[in-house]
Image: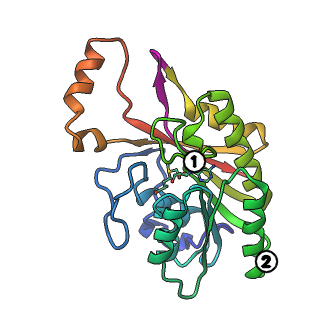
Amino acid sequence: MPIFNDLNLKNWKESEIWTDSLWIISKRDKSEKHNGFYHGNFVPQIPHQIILRYTKKNDIVFDPFLGSGTTVYEAENLNRNFIGIDIQKKLVDYVGKNIEPKNNFSDLITGDSAKINTFEKVKESLKNHKKKKIQLAILHPPYADIIKFSDLKDDLSNIKSLKEFLEKFSIILKNTIEILEKDRYLVIVMGDKYTAGKWIPLGFYCMNEAQKLGLTLKSVIIKNMEGNRAKQNKEAIWRYRALSSDYYIFKHEYILIFKY
Ligand SMILES: C[S@@+](CC[C@H](N)C(=O)[O-])C[C@H]1O[C@@H](n2cnc3c(N)ncnc32)[C@H](O)[C@@H]1O
């Protein structure tokens, strides 16, 4: 049995864990607490698959970009402990009201994930539970400034230059690695963007930041982005724009799997 999950290889044929690098997810899981209200959230199937694949029951899952809490609800469903951070207090309060810790803990912190004092609170939470390290980190940052999440100056989505965005993201990676158990996994979910007629490969740049910090790249998963534009009836206009220009329309984002 792998040391990093609860998979019983004797019954491997029954496992629900996906092993291909192309994830075509046609429908968002809207069960239980996943109501999908938050613009910029990810589908629950992403944390569900990653948590099953890379953690055991009672391990600690860490998410420095909590958002609407998709990851914490999956951690809760799968009996994992959780520590999460978001810069927006109102989100942390909202998610906090929805969680129902039973045998596991879910600690939520309001703060800037690039700041040392925020990570001091993470370490305090670990200490309170008599734990030293986390076993899995899932990072779903803003895709630079594509969606503005808040007016807060330390919000990554308010950074205007790519260089500064990557510098700040790298600090958050570094803070996260410091609390990650050796031989465990860190996952980045990221999309690209267009600016001034250029494709900006944010996914590759973020991958590069993680590799610079010594993480080993284990997989690059491509996930489809079906749905959002269809929901807003914008597919036709995007297709017209693409045909009348020279680019392709984003249909994918990256799930980058690293081992520490
Ligand atoms: C892409 S969303 C995460 C969505 C989440 N995975 C979900 O499913 O709801 C990114 C989040 O990062 C938060 N954020 C932006 N800058 C931050 C920072 N410096 N520290 C902590 N959180 C930050 C935003 O408030 C936003 O909720």
Q: Which mark is residue 31?
A: none
Residue 181 visible in the picture: no
Residue shown at 41% from the left, 59% from the top: 45
* Secondary structure, magenta segment, majority class: strand
Residue shown at 56% from the left, 38% from the top: 158
Answer yes or no: disc 2 within 8 Å of ligand 1: no
In the image, residue 123 lies at what x, y percent?
Answer: 77, 69
Q: Give, as a three-letter code, the residue at label 2.
A: Lys
The reply, left or right, for residue 235 in relation to residue 44 is: left
In the image, residue 8 lies at what x, y percent?
Answer: 55, 73
Q: Along the line of sight, which residue is nearer the eye, 233 or 158?
A: 158
The reply, left or right, for residue 57 in relation to residue 128 is: left
- Which residue is disc 1 drawn over? 152
Residue 192 visible in the picture: yes
Answer yes or no: disc 1 within 8 Å of ligand 1: yes
Q: Give, as a three-letter code, the residue at label 1.
A: Leu
Q: What segment carries the magenta color?
A: 189-198
In the image, residue 142 lies at what x, y percent?
Answer: 53, 44
Give the quadrant of residue 38.
bottom left
Give the quadrant of residue 126.
bottom right
Give the quadrant of residue 248.
top left
**Helix, strand or loop status at disc 2:** helix
Mark 2–mark 1 Cα distance, whole angstroms, equals: 29 Å
In this view, 228 is above or below 15: above
Does the stretch in magenta take in 192?
yes
Residue most extreme to the bottom: 103
Q: Along the line of sight, which residue is nearer the eye, 145 or 222?
A: 145
Tag in front: 2 or 1:
1
In this view, 169 is above or below 194: below
- Which residue is disc 2 drawn over? 127
Residue shown at 27% from the left, 19% from the top: 241
Residue shown at 55% from the left, 70% from the top: 7
